[in-house]
Image (cartoon, rainbow, N blue to C red):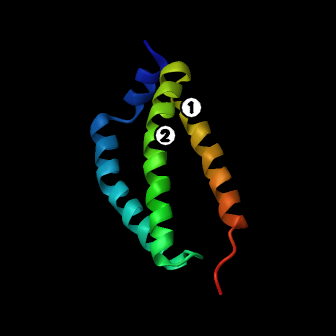
């Protein structure tokens, strides 16, 4: 049996879909609200940058994540998520808040 199929069977499709349906809207709403509130560039510029980065992340993340999952399984995708999150946190740390 394919490794990625085994990993998907560990968490039932119904459980995973239910988790996505409940968690994803909260992430999107809180992400946009926090971006508008904490943007050092101003609300409009911050939201524009947020939306551009989100769109790029959706395209590249799904393509690269799907390829990684097909080649090396879901553990590689989790590793990629940790690395890209750490990179994003380092970049955010360098942005100074507006005074």
Q: Residue at x 57, y 75 (%)?
A: 41
Q: Residue at x 40, y 22 (%)?
A: 5
Which quarter of the figure is the N terminus placed in? top left
Q: Residue at x 33, y 59 (%)?
A: 25
Q: Residue at x 38, y 36 (%)?
A: 11
Q: Residues within 10 Å of mark 1 (few under 14, many from 20)?
A: some
Choose between 48 and 20: the one closer to the eye: 48
Compared to residue 25, the image places residue 61 above or below, namely above
Which quarter of the figure is the C terminus placed in? bottom right
**Which numbered dot is residue 61?**
2
Please, what secondary structure does the residue beneath circle 1 have? helix
Q: Which residue is mark 1?
A: 75
Compared to residue 76, the image places residue 20 above or below, namely below
Q: Is residue 16 visible?
A: yes
Q: What is the quadrant of residue 82 in the picture?
A: top right
| Marks 2 and 1, how far apart at CA | 15 Å
**Which numbered dot is residue 64?**
none
Instruction: Give residue 43's position: percent from left, percent from top.
Output: 47, 77
């Amino acid at each position: 049996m394919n490794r990625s199929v085994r990993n998907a069977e560990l968490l039932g499709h119904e459980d995973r879909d239910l988790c996505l349906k409940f968690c994803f809207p909260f992430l999107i709403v809180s992400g946009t609200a926090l971006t508008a509130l904490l943007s050092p560039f101003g609300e409009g510029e911050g939201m524009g940058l947020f939306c551009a980065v989100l769109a790029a992340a959706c395209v590249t993340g799904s393509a690269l994540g799907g390829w990684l999952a097909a080649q090396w399984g879901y553990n590689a995708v989790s590793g990629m998520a940790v690395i890209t999150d750490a990179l994003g946190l380092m970049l955010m740390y360098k942005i100074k808040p507006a005074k």
